[in-house]
């Protein structure tokens, strides 16, 4: 396990169940877009920046955010160059950008990608996303199997499968329901076998639903479109700060309930 190779700040945020990861997009190679996301993530108080796996983008993200950088890809051979450029965490997934193309990543393929990545980079912290289209019990089984082949963190997804029927807060909760359900199910499966592994809940989350993710067992959240779709950097910073405040509130609630 390479978890302890993570920056101390990330380990601390995970242990406090308050990690905030801002995602610019696995297939987003637009330098200006990544630069804008990096700046607003750093100013807004995020803990980690998740970008496409490209060395030049890693340099750009480090310079503009001041945050540790995670690179995401489904091509393990791309990871070493990004790590050499300064990425401190690598991730297989998430897969949201592939679904509109009809591209589906089955459990066996994800396990194979994880094994290949671990052989290439045995000492780099590795996060793997569990695909949302699998039934919840199969998501939990895949998560456990991923740990056996070298994953250090598990991430959930589900925003693309949600079709909110309402606007406002209720719609935001409906949007987040699939990934929160996955986080709950995987967390319980870990708990049942006595495993403590950081779990990141991502895709479809907002400041409204972030505390729910933490309440079901997530150690942190990953948010992309809720920030990236905003055109104005001031609004993007405000969105990041809103997520940070939501996580602080959820942490206080957890502390009071213990």
Image (tube, rainbow, N blue to C red):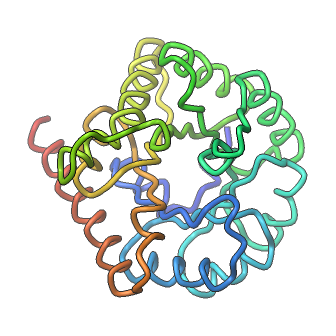
Q: How many dots with numbers? A: 0
Choose between 213 and 115: the one closer to the eye: 213
Image location (x, y in percent) of residue 196: 47, 29
Image location (x, y in percent) of residue 105: 72, 32
Left or right of residue 42: residue 119: right
Outermost residue, left side: 256
Image location (x, y in percent) of residue 195: 49, 23
Q: Name above or below for residue 210 compared with residue 224.
A: above
Left or right of residue 36: residue 204: left
- Which quadrant of the rendered structure holds the N terminus? top right
Rendered residue at 50%/84% (across/down): 39
Q: Name above or below for residue 101 compared with residue 131.
A: below
- Which quadrant of the rendered structure holds the C terminus? top left
Q: Name above or below for residue 241 compared with residue 31.
A: above
Rendered residue at 64%/45% (across/down): 100
Rendered residue at 34%/87% (across/down): 234
Left or right of residue 97: residue 169: left
Rendered residue at 31%/55% (across/down): 206
Image location (x, y in percent) of residue 35: 60, 83
């Amino acid at each position: 396990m390479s978890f302890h190779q993570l920056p101390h700040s990330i380990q601390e945020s995970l242990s406090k169940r308050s990690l905030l990861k801002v995602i610019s997009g696995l297939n987003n190679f637009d330098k200006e877009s990544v630069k804008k996301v990096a700046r607003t993530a750093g100013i807004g108080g995020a803990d980690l920046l998740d970008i496409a796996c490209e060395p030049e983008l890693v340099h750009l993200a480090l310079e503009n955010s001041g945050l540790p950088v995670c690179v995401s890809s489904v091509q393990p051979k791309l990871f070493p160059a990004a790590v050499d450029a300064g990425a401190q965490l690598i991730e297989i997934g998430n897969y949201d950008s592939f679904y509109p193309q009809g591209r589906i990543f089955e459990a066996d393929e994800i396990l194979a990608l994880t094994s290949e990545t671990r052989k290439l980079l045995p000492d780099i912290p590795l996060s793997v996303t569990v695909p949302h289209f699998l039934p919840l019990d199969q998501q939990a089984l895949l998560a456990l199997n991923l740990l056996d082949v070298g994953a250090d963190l598990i991430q959930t997804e589900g925003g693309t499968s949600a079709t909110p029927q309402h606007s406002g807060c209720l719609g935001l909760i409906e949007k987040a329901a699939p990934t929160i359900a996955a986080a709950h199910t995987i967390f319980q499966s870990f708990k049942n076998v006595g495993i403590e592994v950081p779990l990141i809940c991502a895709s479809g989350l907002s400041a409204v639903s972030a505390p729910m993710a933490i309440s079901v067992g997530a150690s942190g959240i990953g948010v992309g479109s809720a920030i990236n779709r905003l055109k104005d950097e001031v609004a993007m910073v405000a969105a990041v700060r809103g997520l940070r405040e939501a996580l602080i509130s959820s942490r206080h609630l957890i502390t009071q309930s213990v």
